[in-house]
Image (cartoon, coloured by chain):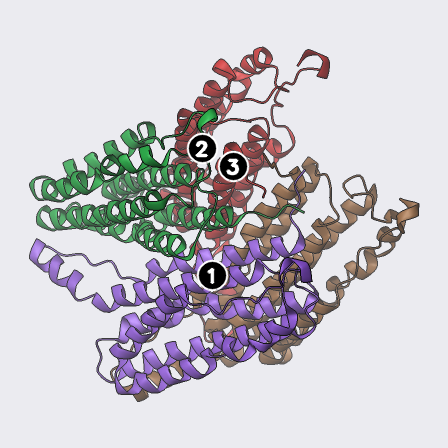
Chain colours: A green, B purple, C brown, D red
Amino acid sequence: MARMTDSARVEAFSDGVFAIAITLLILEIRVPTARTGLDLWHALGDEWPSYSAYVVSFMVIGVMWVNHHTIFSYIARVDRTLIFLNLVLLLVVAALPFPTALVAQNLREPQASNVAVAVYGAVMVGHAATMALFWYYVTRTGHCFDDRVDIRAARATRARFSLGLVVYPATVALAFASAVLALAVHFVLAVYYAFNQTPVPTLSPEDR
Amino acid sequence: MARMTDSARVEAFSDGVFAIAITLLILEIRVPTARTGLDLWHALGDEWPSYSAYVVSFMVIGVMWVNHHTIFSYIARVDRTLIFLNLVLLLVVAALPFPTALVAQNLREPQASNVAVAVYGAVMVGHAATMALFWYYVTRTGHCFDDRVDIRAARATRARFSLGLVVYPATVALAFASAVLALAVHFVLAVYYAFNQTPVPTLSPEDR
Amino acid sequence: MARMTDSARVEAFSDGVFAIAITLLILEIRVPTARTGLDLWHALGDEWPSYSAYVVSFMVIGVMWVNHHTIFSYIARVDRTLIFLNLVLLLVVAALPFPTALVAQNLREPQASNVAVAVYGAVMVGHAATMALFWYYVTRTGHCFDDRVDIRAARATRARFSLGLVVYPATVALAFASAVLALAVHFVLAVYYAFNQTPVPTLSPEDR
Amino acid sequence: MARMTDSARVEAFSDGVFAIAITLLILEIRVPTARTGLDLWHALGDEWPSYSAYVVSFMVIGVMWVNHHTIFSYIARVDRTLIFLNLVLLLVVAALPFPTALVAQNLREPQASNVAVAVYGAVMVGHAATMALFWYYVTRTGHCFDDRVDIRAARATRARFSLGLVVYPATVALAFASAVLALAVHFVLAVYYAFNQTPVPTLSPEDR
C-alpha cells in the first residue's frame, strides 16, 4: 500500500521530464544514406557537430538531473509555489534539445556557429536563473525541507548556488570568440558539476 | 516489497503521459540553419510564435498535471469506469502537442492564426469536458475516494470544477477577435489555476 | 527505503513503454499550414483519417495497458522467461504507432486503405499471439503468481484469453471489405475489453 | 510516506531512459503511402531492413535493460562516481536509435550496408566498454553493493563481464563480410544474453 509523498511524486514527474529530454537528443542527429561505403563514412564524418552536441547536452542534462535530485532528497513537503517554480525550471530543461539541434546544424558554419552556441549558453543562463530562484525560495523559510537541513547555513549557500549566473553569461561571450571552445567549456562545466555540486548543509543529529 | 496500490499505478501511468506530452512540445520548434550570424538571428527571431506556443502549452500541461495529481491524491481505489474516464482525459492531454504546433506554424498568418488558436481553445474545451465528466463520476458515489473526503461537499463543487466549460468556449470566440490575445489568456488561465485550483473538500478528522 | 519487487520493476518498465507509445501517437498527425482561415479549416478537415487513427489507437493501447496491468497485479515473481516473453509483448505494443500512421496516411485512398487497415489488424493479431503465449506460460506452472490465484482455474481461461486470435484475424479479412468499418471494429473491441476483460480466477481466502 | 533509496532513484531514471529509447525505435520506420493496394504491399515489403533493425534493436535494448536492472538489484548505495559512470552508460544506450536508423536506411545498399552494420557494432563495443567500466568500479571496493554480494567472487567475474569487448569487435569485422549476417548475430547475442547473463555471485546467508 505504498503511496509516495507529494514531494516524491513531484520528483518522479521531474525525473520523467529529464529522462525524456535526455533521450530525445538522439533524434536530432540526421541519419545519412549513401551508395558506397566510402560515401557513408564521409557523410558520417561530416556529422561531428551532431555527435559533439549530443555528448555535451547528454552530460549537461544528466548532471542537471543529478543536482535536481540531490536537492529534492532534502525536500519533504511541497507547496503550490514550489511546484510552480519547479515547472518553470523544467520548462528550461525540456527546451535544451532545441539549442542542441541548433548547435548541431550550424556548428560548421563559421559565423552562424557563434550565434548557435551563444543561444545554447543563453538557455543555460535561463537554467541557472530558474535554479537560483528555486533555491532562493526553498531556503527562504525552509518549510519544505526535512529536518536534516541547516536552514541558516543553506541560506548562506545562495551565492554559490547562483554561480551559474556568472559562469554561463561568460560562455555566451566566449561563444562569439570561439564556438567550439565555448561548447567544450559547457562539457567541462557539466563534468565539474557532476563531482563538485555545492552540498546542502545539514545539522548534526543532536541539533535537529 | 513495496507494491503500489492500484490508484498509485494509474496515477504513475498518467504522470508518464503528462511528462512525455510536455517534453515532446519542444520537437515542434523548427531548427533554423543559416550562413551568417545575422541571418541566424533573424531566422531565430521569426520563430517567436513557436516559443510562445511552447511556453503556453508547457504551463498548460504542467498545471493540468498538478491538478490531476491533486485529485488523485484523494483517490484510494479505482474501478474500470474510472480507469476508462481517465484514459479519455489523457487522450485529450496527449493531443495538445498537435494544436500547439498548429498555433506555432500559423500564428504569423493574419487569418489562419484565428482558426489555429480557436482549435487550440476547442481542445481545451475537450479537456474541461473530460475533467468535468471525471469529477462528476468520482463524486457521484464517492466509492473511489479515501476517507478524508467530504463527499457531499465534493459533489457541491461540481459547478466550480466545470467552470472551464464556460471559460474555454469563451477563448474560442476570443480567438476570432485576436489570436495572440486568446493565446495569452490561455497562459494567464494556466498560471491562475496553478495557484487557485478548487480544493477537494475534506472532513474534519473526527467526522471520518 | 522502499525497494520495489522485481515484478513491480518489470511492470514499471512496461508501463513506461505503454505510456510513451500512447503519447507518441500524436506525432503522426501532420500539422497543416494555410494562408486563409478557410484553407486551414479545409486542411484540418482533410485529416480526419489521422484523428480517427489517433483515437482508435489511443484506446487500443490504453486498454492493452489496463489488461497488462491487471495480469501483473497477480504476479509476485518474475523469471528470465517471463521477462523475455514480456519483452516480445512490448515489442508489438511499441510497434503500434507504425500501423497507426499507415492507416492515417492511406485511409482516404480507396484501395490502399484496405491494405493499411489489414496491416493494422495483423499487428493486433501479433499482440493477441504474444498475449496468449504470455498467459500460457504464466498459467503453466503458476510459479510466478501470488497465492491468491487459482492456478487450475486460470489454466482453464486460456481459451478465452486467446479469443483475440480468432477476433483479430477476422478484422484483417473485414479490412478488405471495408477499411473504415474494420477500423471502427478495433475501436469497439477496445472499449469492450476495457469493461469486459476475462478476470484472473482467485481462490477463496481459506483455500490459499 | 515511501521514499525510494538513492539507488532506486538512479535505477528508475535509468529505466526511463531505456523505456524511452526502446519506444522511440519505431519512429525510424518510414510510413509509406500508395495509390493502389498492390503498390502499398510493395512499399511495405521494401522496408524489410527497417523491420529487421527494429526487432534486433528492441531485443538488444530490452536485454540491456534486464541486465542493467539485475546488477542494480544488488546495489544498495550510490556515489557520485557510480552515478557518473551510469550516465556514460546511458549515453550509449540512448544513442542506439541512431545506428538502428542507419542500418534501416542503408541495409539494401550493397556497400553502404557494411559500413552501417559496422557502426552499429561499434556502438555495441561502446556499450560493452561502459558496462565493463561500470562493473570494474562497483566490484573494486564493493561499497555500493548490498550485503548479499560476495565481493571477492564478483571481482573474479570481471573478465566474463567484459566478454562483450571481444565479441562485439568481432561483429564489426563480420559486418564487412556480411552486413545481414552480422545484424543477425546481434539478434542472437541479445537472445543469448537474455537467458545467460553472468550471475552476480552471492554469499550464503551465514557468511554475510
Q: Residue furthest right?
A: C207
**Labels 1 & 2 near each other (Cβ < 8 A):** no
3 and 2 marks on the same chain: no
Residue count near mark 3 (Cα–Cα under 10 Å), binned few <14, some 14–19, many ≥20: many
Q: Is C118 drawn above or below residue A150 in the view shown?
A: below
Q: Is D146 drawn above or below residue A64 in the view shown?
A: above
* Residue D58, horizontal then vertical, whole percent: 53, 45
| Label of residue A148 in the image | 2
Tell me the subunit letter for badge 1.
Answer: B
B45 horizontally vs A26: left or right: left
Where is mark 1, residue-wise? B65
**Labels 1 & 3 near each other (Cβ < 8 A):** no
C-alpha distance separating marks 1 and 3: 24 Å
C-alpha distance separating marks 3 and 2: 25 Å
1 vs 3, front mark: 1
Nearer to me, D172 or C144: C144
Q: Is residue C46 visible?
A: no
Where is mark 3, residue-wise? D11
Nearer to me, D166 or A146: A146
C-alpha distance separating marks 1 and 2: 30 Å
Tell me the subunit letter for badge 2.
Answer: A
Q: Residue at x 51, y 52 (%)?
A: D51
Q: Secondary structure at mark 1?
A: helix
Q: Is C201 drawn above or below residue A138 in the view shown?
A: below
Q: Is C65 drawn above or below residue D55 in the view shown?
A: below
Nearer to me, A147 or A41: A147
Q: Secondary structure at mark 3?
A: helix
Residue count near mark 1 (Cα–Cα under 10 Å), binned few <14, some 14–19, many ≥20: many
Q: Amino acid at mark 2?
A: Arg
